Amino acid sequence: MSARALWLAFRSGLGGRQAFSTKGSGRITVEVIEHLERLALVDFGSREAVARLEKAIAFADRLREVDTDGVEPMESVLEDRCLYLRSDNVAEGNCAEELLQNSRQVVEEYFVAPPGNISLPKLGEQESFQHS
Amino acid sequence: MAAPMLRRVGLGRLWGFAWVDGGSGHRRGSPNGSTSSRRREQSSVAQQPLHTAQKPRKGGHKWAAVVGLEIHAQISSNSKLFSGSQVSFMAPPNSLVSFFDASLPGTLPVLNRRCVEAAVMTGLALNCHINKKSLFDRKHYFYSDLPAGYQITQQRLPIAANGSLTYGVFMGNKQSRMATKTVRIRQIQLEQDSGKSLHDDLRSQTLIDLNRAGVGLLEVVLEPDLCCGEEAAAVIKELQLILQALGTSQANMAEGQLRVDANISVHHPGEPLGVRTEVKNLNSIRFLAKAIDHEIQRQINELESGGEILNETRSFDCKLGCTVPMRDKEGKQDYRFMPEPNLPPLVLYDSASLPAGTESQQVINIDQIRDALPELPSATRERLVRRYGMLPEHSFTLLNEVGLLQFFQNVMKETRAEPKKVTSWVLNTLLGYLKHHNLAVSESPVTSSALAELLDLLDSKAISSAAAKQVFEELWKGEAKSAAQVVSEKQLELMQDREALEQLCQSTMEGHPQVVTDMKSGNPRAINKLIGLVRKATLNRADPAEIKDILERLSS
């Protein structure tokens, strides 16, 4: 059996709403994992990956120990830089051939993509889900 | 005791006031507590009279619709928002795409100054507060025409917010009166456009053209202050005119430069807002109004028959004339907004805050842009009304029709005729012919010079107004004849010889003594009959007013 199938069996064995307990404040539920997997199209293929996620959250949580009263939140590390404004001239483009080389399939200078978004199967159907 | 609240209800063109029971529904006065007399009891409680302009629907409940619009206008610029590839409507597929637009690794966004200026101009024209500091964010979702997997937009702190747009709506069925209304603008933000997908259902694939990917868009978000399709259409029309006057967008809906999504819900006044649906794929103002009205009706029908409204996205099918659910939308999207890490905040200045010694190319001065704003449509209309004394409705029509204002002004330049006459001829006669033959102003066979000449002839009383209409019809054939030529060819000149006309009147009167007696005894129809007879005798070459004058003089 593949690692993924084992993982699925493990999850369904635990039942729907089990939470993975951690030492820290995070309780990552199965729903959150599934939600993240769909949104970001990542694959938390194993228990270790979830544990790593929880450790990352615990690490970030330590930020809350800092007293930020009266401090303006930072927008980004670039926030005191000047945003460069480019003048409105045409300087790029005209490289269709080069760009189309990146595509596995091309039809008359168009990129070819699957028809619309293919829905991810629901949890119960994932046994038959094949990685392409 | 809670006072009954008076709430405004609008649906379509009918406006009325409906009672909303604001509290626990106490009944004062009548000891008879039967529910059928509830209305009467409420009015006895009332301090104000009850008006209803609407027939109550079944169940006696009135519905109010709430419509919010989200508009995406493609910025009219040479290059894209964050890259230097060209912005053009027609071009070979994927030929206007830079490495950044194709989302190749290692590429970074560089902001186009023109797009920022366009956003500031639009914000100022729509009375918005311009945020001196605005931020860029990433909005993530997966679709084949979005190569990066996210769109750079301004969700947290947009470039402009809290504005208003004043527009005119025709009241009543005859389009004879105009009312001015205002819709609030929540915010205006800069964002990237996505590429174009062509669906090939036969081969089960989608063809992607990234020429449009990365083009700058202005998203204008309106507060849900609208109540029907007609108001929405008027708002969009006004916004189009403003954007075109500013030059920030060509705002042509058919070419996709202006895209509108509508959020629609219905509720009973006084109750919380209903579930809203989003309607997309509206590519003309006419369909926009139709789709909104249809969706409002669909929701009302659904709720009245006990169903419920799903928070879904629907598409307007123009062939069927109704909204249908869109495929490919699974529940609520989580866009995982995050700040765009590659772009610092966008800082704008005004004359007071402008730092000294900075390169003018790198700073944007809001005050400078405000001073350079062109005349907005509302100001143009006011100017027309003031200068030419026309009705506000006329000024709206002149601006709404592409090229008509220019035509009107050209005629005014070349003719001596009064503005009111010119207005009437342009708006009634010319526009009527154009509409009947489905032509644009630019395709009019009658040029502004020709019309000016015709109006001069009319003004100098060389021809009667009936003859002028005939001349216009002849000119419409487009045979490159001048008005004067047509007049002489068809012998439409008014009789200039007053004596001859008097003689004709005299002879006509002698020929019809009975009618003359009727006229003298005060029968108004008799004189008209005589005028008609004289006109026939002159082959329509006499001015009826003059004939009447002579007849009255001769018979006194």
Image (cartoon, coloured by chain):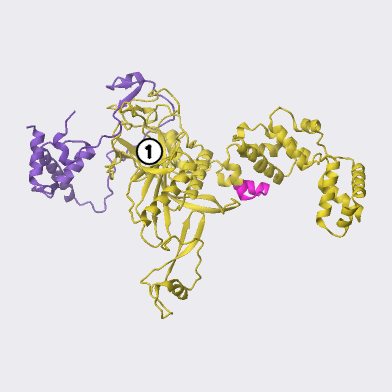
Q: Which chain is yellow?
A: B
* Residue B222 in sight from this viewpoint: no
Q: Amino acid at mark 1?
A: Glu
Q: Does residue B107 sit above or below B247 in this rendering?
A: above
Does residue A53 appear left or right of residue B508 in this picture?
A: left
Residue at the (8%, 46%) spot, across then down: A14
Give the chain letter at badge 1: B
Q: Assess whether residue B385 is covered by the magenta stretch.
A: yes
Secondary structure of the residue carrying tag 1 is strand
Does residue A38 appear left or right of residue B272 in this picture?
A: left
Q: Assess whether residue B455 is covered by the magenta stretch.
A: no
Residue A49: x %, y % from top left = 12, 38
Q: Colour of chain A?
A: purple
Residue A62: x %, y % from top left = 15, 47
Principal SS element in the magenta part?
helix
Q: Quadrant of the N terminus of chain B?
A: bottom left
The quarter of the displayed image where residue B456 is located:
top right
Task: Tell me where the magenta segment starts and ends, as one range.
Answer: B380-394
Q: Which residue is mark 1?
A: B191
Residue at the (70%, 46%) spot, across then down: B420
Please name whichever residue, B114 or B252, is drawn nearer the observer in this view of the structure: B252
Residue at the (74%, 30%) spot, across then down: B482
Does residue A132 appear left or right of residue B377 in this picture?
A: left
